[in-house]
Amino acid sequence: MNPQGDLSRFEAFKREVLNLPNLITIGRLFLIPPVLVLIDPTDPVRNFIAALLFAAASGLDILDGWLARRQNLVTVFGKFMDPLADKLMAMAVMIWLVTVSLLPAWLVVVMIGRDFYISGLRSVAANQGVVIAAGEGGKMKTVMQLIGICCVLARYRYRMPFSPVDVNFHELGMGFIYVALVLSIISAVQYTLEFGRTLKEHRTS
């Protein structure tokens, strides 16, 4: 046994995984089950609480990224886990919303299929020693998608503060999600073109 080696490995593990930004990222995943349990198409209060929890989980994404950069704690684990947490949150909730007839199944299939397609492209590129950076379109798609899901979870008509206007949050949320759908298709095309270009450059270099 090598106690010194075990200690150094533990310290490396702690620096890589057990830092505050990564713990926040992992904690976001634990908010998914309560959101799913609270989704109820007949209960405005439960749905509103689910929307607040989902919004909190989405907002923590900004916090963990800011902390990682501020404290110089950007890690390989964090780079992998942060986008994975976003995808797991969105996929789990969207699939559940399909089961309670609050989202059309075809839309969710297209968006999840797009994510698997992009992940596949990145894996193939990585095997060739090529890194495809996330584009602005993909980032904006994620923002629109998360906002849309929050609104669909709230789903009822609410009076806006300091205004006589009532807003149907389900319709508002669907608007955001359709925008995210368009952005997801555009970004998938951009990823494909970038994949072909960078792979060609890599092979000719």
Image (spheres, grey):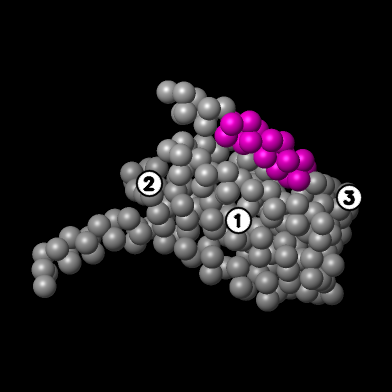
Residue 48 position within the rendered picture, expressed as x and y whole percent measured from the top left: 73, 66
Q: Classify residue 131 as left or right of residue 111.
A: left
Quarter of the image with the N terminus in it? bottom left
Labelled pair 1, 2 in contact (Cβ < 8 Å): no
| Residue 5 makes an appearance in the image | yes
Q: Amino acid at mark 2?
A: Val
Image point (84%, 74%), residue name:
42
Labelled pair 2, 3 in contact (Cβ < 8 Å): no
Which residues make up the magenta segment? 179-196
Whether the magenta-drawn stretch holds residue 187 is answered as yes
> Is 69 above or below relative to 4?
above
Judging from the image, what secondary structure is the residue with disc 3 in? Answer: loop
| Viewer-proximal residue among 191 and 196 | 196
Whether the magenta-drawn stretch holds residue 63 is answered as no
Q: Determine which residue is flagged by label 2.
A: 74
Q: Determine which residue is flagged by label 3.
A: 164
For marks 1 and 2, give the CA distance. 20 Å
Closer to viewer: mark 1 or mark 2 = 1
